[in-house]
Amino acid sequence: MRALIPALNPGVVHARLLEFVQSVLRPLGGAAPRGAASAKGSLQARLEAFIRAEQQRQGVVGLAVGVVHKGKVVLAKGYGSANLEHDVPVTADTLFQSGSLGKQFTAMAVMAQVEAGRLSLSDSITKFFPDAPASWAPITVRHLLTHTSGIQDLEGKLDERKDYTDEDFARYIYALPLEFQPGARWGYSNSGYVLLGILVNRVAGKFYGEVLAEQVFRPAGMKTARGISEDDIVPHRSSGYRRVGEAVKHQTWVSPSLNTTADGSLYFSVKDMLAWDAAVERRALLREESWREILSPAKLNSGSSQPYGFGWEVLERAGQPLHKHSGAWQGFRTAYARFIGERLSIVVLANTAQSSPSRFVEGLAAIVNPALAVPPLAAIPDTEPEVTAQAAKLMEQVRDGTVDPARFAYVPEGLLSQRFPHYQALLRKLGAPGPLVLVKREVRGDDRLYQYQVRLGEGTWLLSMGLIPDGRVSFFDVRAP
């Protein structure tokens, strides 16, 4: 199912990307532009130079980019190919699959039902799914929107070649054990948004895609945004691609029903997304109180905040709000970010599975305003040496294959069975690590997240670890920066 592309950790943006941004900024030398037109032209030229260089570096077949700065569209353009077989270039009209970027539109469909009085955010979802397990009674509509329901993610579990009805999807999700008590934690779940789409279908009496067309797309001026369809003739539709070694292949096929679910089954162009950005800027389509709900961090049962609203990550950069989301599905990758203090919005839509639209977003933001650049990693005071010792010990146990599963809680599926063998081979190959240097510590919800630089072999690597309040490990990762 659809994936949220993980947010880039500060300093993890590829070194060449940062070097290129700096090289683009360096020739400015503080010289003032002669006029608004020349300033815009200069900015557009710098943005495009970066896009083309980064496209080549990442090997992206095709992408479309939109940049809005202080109410003005600075860039809305396509690069590369929308269809290699027919030699069709990407334009600002090219349609890309949304991936999880579509979740913010599902949230709009749900809030439209709230405003119409058909449901409440505090309603138990068993009101709409009466045959759901009894353990679901505490799960509310709000929990589904904020990924705090405890319902397991469908990704990797469904047979992607099989067609499912709404009832099939619901019954399949019913059978998944809850990962945690509703509201206790945050856990990204496509399942929750699949259920939200079914819920809208039931309370509105029509397909959620029709609700979006009538109450979001048309009023917002998103002229070509629509649901995915293999049957329909869809002008300007891009193909999705994946790289296999040096070869470019088509996206993998999935059954049509998997492209009707509300976890991210939309087509839109960069023009559509710029129209959407203008609607978001105006707080259009819904009442102001609905927008406040959408863009407010979730509250866990403990009272802690989780930086996720309804289909939006609600973060901060340079002391100002940063609202963003991303997506990945069937050879497409998407990213949309709004740097609120700068009044800067960036949309990147790509048709290559291995691409990273978020790297484009970060590089473009830094060109518009260097203060928005991801801060480089640097050592910070380590006030919890016992945690650092725990991280070092865990890395040693992973290398030796002696990890005790009881030390972990709520870890991503496949971490112990799939990722740890990979980490073990990597750490054995690289040899004994150097000391861990703490470069980042943050709290998300009730979890503490730590990131360390560590010397392995001939290079410096990043070790990340998350701890829940009782000290068990909720996240572990080793990767090159």
Image (cartoon, rainbow, N blue to C red):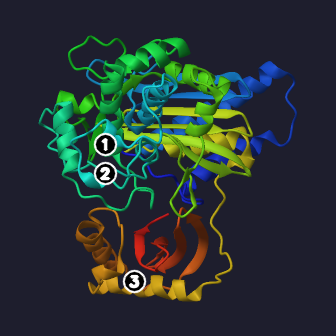
Q: Residue at x 54, y 71 (%)?
A: 448
Using a 10 Å C-alpha cutoff, classify the residue at mark 2 as few (fewer than 14 neighbours), some (14 to 19) or many (20 or more).
many
- Which disc is residue 394 wearing? 3
**Kind of residue at disc 1:** Thr
In-front residue for pair 229/30 = 229
The answer to which of 257 and 117 lies nearer the viewer is: 117
Residue type at mark 3 is Leu
Categorize mark 1 by other alpha carbons within 10 Å: few (<14), some (14-19), many (20+). some
The label on residue 126 is 1
Quarter assignment of residue 12: bottom right
Which marked residue is nearer to the observer: mark 1 or mark 3? 1
| Residue nearest the observer in this picture, 350 or 60 | 350
Camera-near label (3 vs 2) is 2
At horizontal 36% and vertical 45% (from top left) the residue drawn is 3
Image spot of residue 343 (x, y percent): 71, 33
Label 2 SS:
helix
Q: Which residue is mark 2?
A: 136
Q: Position of 111 compared to 69: left or right?
A: left
First-in-chain label (3 vs 2): 2
How far apart marks 3 and 2 lie (CA) works out to: 35 Å
